[in-house]
Structures are given as structure tokens and as C-alpha cells.
Amino acid sequence: MTSRERMRMTLDHRVPDRVPCHMNATTWIKNELKTACRVSDDGKLLDCLHVDTWDMRGIDIRNGTMPRYAGPDHPVLDADWRGNILHVWALKEKVVETPFGNLYEQEDYPLRGASSVEELKSYPWPDPDWFDCSDLKNRLTPWADRSIIASGGSVWQHPSYVRGLDVLMIDMAVDPELAVYVFDRFTEFYLAFFERILQAAGELIDCCALADDLGTQTGLMISPDMFDEFVSPRIRRFADLVHSHGSKLIFHSDGNIRSIIPRLIDAGVDVLDPLQPEAEGMDLAGIKKEFGSDVVLRGGISTQQTLTQGSEKDVAEEVKRVIEVLGKDGGYICSPGHPVLQADIPVRNILAMYRAIQEYGAY
């Protein structure tokens, strides 16, 4: 069974030959994994780890196979753009050194000080016509044996990148006209951008993904009522687009989002990512029992504890346990509880996780 066949069966809540798995990682971790696996390119790394998916933005979500930038001179975007979404919104980032290794960090929030819709309108908002999809299908064909995921969309989180999360949440409470304007700019862009991708190469794309962190370790960042007003209708529009092209919608949110899982399902979400087992209320067995027949589950392997602090044996035991819980009757994609493997996780534990998925993932 090919990786794509395995994933498509899982997305349809059928039981394949084994549990499929997914991976994203920082650039530095990706390169360390290549060294450990003695491979030189991304495809061979995925082969080495038996990863079933290919994120169009690449393993490190900034060096993938995306539409070509063909727009005007831009402060950040250029012809070498390969998927770094911050660049689309004219945002810059810097490399930050931590005790564990390097990370990327956004430098500023350019619309933080705007106080009117007129000020918001003056921002250099991107145009989906800047991106050329004419040869996208041909360039994606080498990845066709894997399940290709078109990622990078957002209706809630990315607006905070230009406005600042605290300011955006204040807007939602006291000046919703500002919030709605920013939400709409992002939503309309991503709908048009992904429509072009799906028209050009939809037959190769199994999933599209929205990244919209709504949860903290203990609960939601916003009330369910605010979710219903500002977020859910935009997710529904995205789900309708994706489904019209025969694809599935992945919705990413860390943290405790247990209370809105039914709302996400009602909005058209097909895959919930990631299950963060350390977050309050995100009991894996309970979520599988309550929602497993309605939504595919991804994640579940502890990054805050086991992957960062445990031994290779601890990692293997956790993978075995999580697969037994979430893999029952299909509908599970194995991956960490935080989707991007970062510098605080020892490479040996990452390798142990993917070995264990192979060992314990067979149905």
C-alpha cells in the first residue's frame, strides 16, 4: 500500500495496513535528522522515517513546492519564495538563540497601532493574482505517492500576526469593525489562493490545512460565542471550498479546545490536529470515544514531557499506548502533540518515535 492509499483510507475512516504518520520540523532539526539518517534531501528523509505525508510548504514549512511568486517588487516576497507564509503578509522574522538551539521569531506587528479601518486599508495587502500556479501540478508530481497537504491558511491566528493577539482580541470585544476587516482580508485572500491551488493541482492534494490556535493549556482564548461569531463561519467557507474539490480540511489548534470540537465538526472540519495530551481536558481516550467517528485525529505524542524529557524506551512505550487508544478502527494519523518538532527534542527521540510507529502501527 502506498502512503497516499494509506492516508486516503484513514481520511475515510477506514482501516489501512498501518497507522499513517506526519512530520514537520524546524530547519535545524530537519538538517540534524538528515545527518542522522545519512540522507541529503527532504524526500529521502521522509523515506527514512516512513512518513506518509508531504506538506506543500516543506518539512520546515518554508522550503516546499508552492505557487511561484510573480507579483510586483515586494519588501519580503521574491521569486525564490517557497512557502514562508509570514512573507506573504510583508512580515519579517529573526533567528533567536535558545538554550536548546535556534528558533524563528516574528520581528514586529505592523498594524498594532492602527485605530481605524482607513489605516488598516493602507497596508500592502497581498493579491492572490501575484502567485502563478500554471506549473504547480507538474512540480508536485514527484510527491504524488505521498498524501499531499496544502497548508498555510488561517482565518484567526494569522490576523494576529499583523495586529497583535492582544489588540485583535480587544478589537473583537470593543471595536468589532476593525477585527472583521482584518479577518476578512485574510479569509478572502486564502480562499482565493487555495482555490487557485486546487484548480491547478487538486487531484494530487488530499488535504488543505488551516492553522488557528484557539486553546491555552487550560481552556479557550476566546469564548464559544466569539468563536461562533468571528471564526466558525470563516472555517465553514474554507471547508466548503476544500470539499468542493474532493479534498479534506485539517484544522490545527494546540491546547484545550475540547468544548468547541462539536462546533469544529459542524463547521466542516475533517481532521483535528494536534491532540495535545498535556492540555487540560484533552483526554485521548475520551476524545476518541466521543468524536472519533466524526473527525480524524492527529497528534497525541507528548512533546512537553515524553519527547523532550523521556528516554527512547519511554518514547516507544508512549507511541504504543497512543496508537492502541487512537488507532482503534482507523481514523488516526500519528504525530507529535505539537506539529513542528523543535530544538528542545533530542534527535534520538524523534528517530525512536518514527521507529515505534512502524513497529506498533500495523493493523
Image (tube, rainbow, N blue to C red):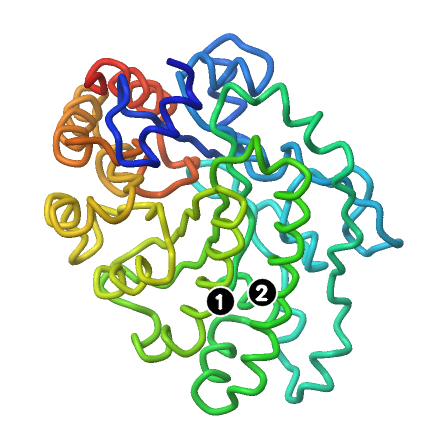
Q: Nearer the viewer, residue 120 or 7?
A: 7
Residue drawn at the location 37% of the way across and 62% of the way down: 267
Secondary structure category for the residue under label 1: helix
Q: Quadrant of residue 322?
A: top left
Side of 350 relative to 202 (left or right): left
Identify residue type, mark 1. Arg
Which callout, 1 or 2, points at the residue further toward the start of the chain? Answer: 2
Is residue 144 shown above or below 195? above
Label drawn at residue 187: 2
Q: Nearer the viewer, residue 150 or 47?
A: 150
Identify residue type, mark 2. Thr
- Where is residue 190? Give x, y as percent: 61, 57
Residue drawn at the location 69% of the way across and 52% of the way down: 87
Q: Nearer the viewer, residue 351 or 88?
A: 88
Side of 17 relative to 182 (left or right): left
Side of 330 relative to 168 (left or right): left
- Where is residue 109? Give x, y as percent: 62, 68
Residue drawn at the location 60% of the way across and 16% of the way down: 41
Query: Spatial distance from mark 1 to mark 2, Cα to Cα?
Result: 7 Å
Q: Are marks 1 and 2 in contact (CB under 8 Å)?
A: yes
Secondary structure category for the residue under label 2: helix
**Label 1 sits on residue:** 234
Q: Quadrant of residue 261?
A: bottom left
Residue drawn at the location 22% of the way across and 31% of the way down: 330
